[in-house]
Amino acid sequence: MSVTIRDVARAAGVSITTVSRALNDAAGVSPVTQNHILRTASLLGYSPNRSAQSLRRTTSNMIGVVIKGPANPFFTELLEPIERCLREHGYVVSTIRVLHNDDEIGAYLDFAASYRVSGFIMLGGWRGAGAQGWERVDVPSVLCTVPEILGADRESYSSVAVDDAQAIDLIVAHLLGLGHERIAFLGPAAGEDSIGTSRMEHFVRAMQARGIDPDPRLLLRGKSGTSSYSYEYGRQVTHDFLSSGASATAIVGMSDVIAVGALRALHDAGLKVPQDMAVTGFDGVGITQFLSPRLTTVAQPIQAIAEETCHVLFERMRGPIHRHVLLPATLIEAESTVGGLP
């Protein structure tokens, strides 16, 4: 297995950025530190990536897009208008795909150390990175679809996202208006601090604001460590819920992908939607309107999110200005809820 720049940084006790600067004879590294890094690299047998070096020397108009959870179809639909906007402004786009349980900070650091990048868009993830994690980001960047970093000063980062509180409130009002009161929320795996956790918190507050305290047994979370944003996760957690004996008349999925998995579990259990159980999603991905039944969901404004993200990033690249943008969602009523109560 080849030695990476991260291995050199770990062995030398310095940051990946410092190693990159030392190996490329860039400014900002003392002669003593540079010699220490060069010796460490030599002892480890580190061989630089020549293609990356060539690209780093010749490219200065690259924007990196770090995608946490690349299998999520919502991100696929959002990436297209982001790429179009960046290219219209003369930038080359490189996507860095990070699996759900992998480290987005490490992926960013590896890429930023190897390539000359003007800015980054962080699509998904980062909410649980904390202040220390974000402090390691030294290239102008903006969070996309993520409104906050837990524990970090909001004046230290920028974000563009849908207004989760407003979106969840639309769903709760819709279901209560249909007569549902025992509503389950299908959230992320136990112990996870993803955006799904925030949406679950908004769900609890929206119910309480209308005089209903959600039954804790209806706040559904999968096993710790499982990949939360997948069809299988939604199917499995819904299956476990149905097997538990707890009762509900509606399920709110924290994403469309998870809601689709819930539909599968309900079908396998012989339950009809919405007659036996109403189901809603969150995102508004295209596939939801081609299902049977079509899925009631809240649609995120994809085009507006993409354009605002690019504009906020361009502002960051021009100077140390931070902004937080929240955009409203739209409720799409469809067959998975409209059709009466059991």
Image (cartoon, grey):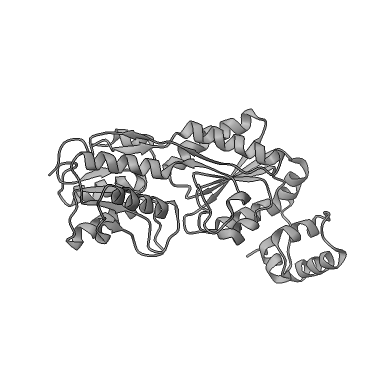
Find residue 214 and report its image quarter. Answer: bottom left
Relative placement, left or right, of 275 versus 155 is left
Question: From what the image shows, is residue 332 above or below residue 35?
Answer: above
Q: How many marks?
A: 0
- Is residue 282 visible in this depiction of the protein? no
* Relative depth, front residue between 287 and 105: 105
Q: Position of residue 98 (x, y in %)?
A: 53, 52
Q: Position of residue 97 (x, y in %)?
A: 54, 49
Extreme left residue here?
342
At 84% across and 54% down in the image, what residue appears?
A: 27
Relative placement, left or right, of 168 versus 2 is left
Relative placement, left or right, of 336 versus 332 is left
Question: From what the image shows, is residue 13 above or below residue 243?
Answer: below
Give the quarter of the figure containing the N terminus. bottom right
Give the quarter of the figure containing the C terminus. top left
Find residue 48 and report its image quarter. Answer: bottom right
Find residue 40 and report its image quarter. Answer: bottom right
- Is residue 15 visible in this depiction of the protein? yes
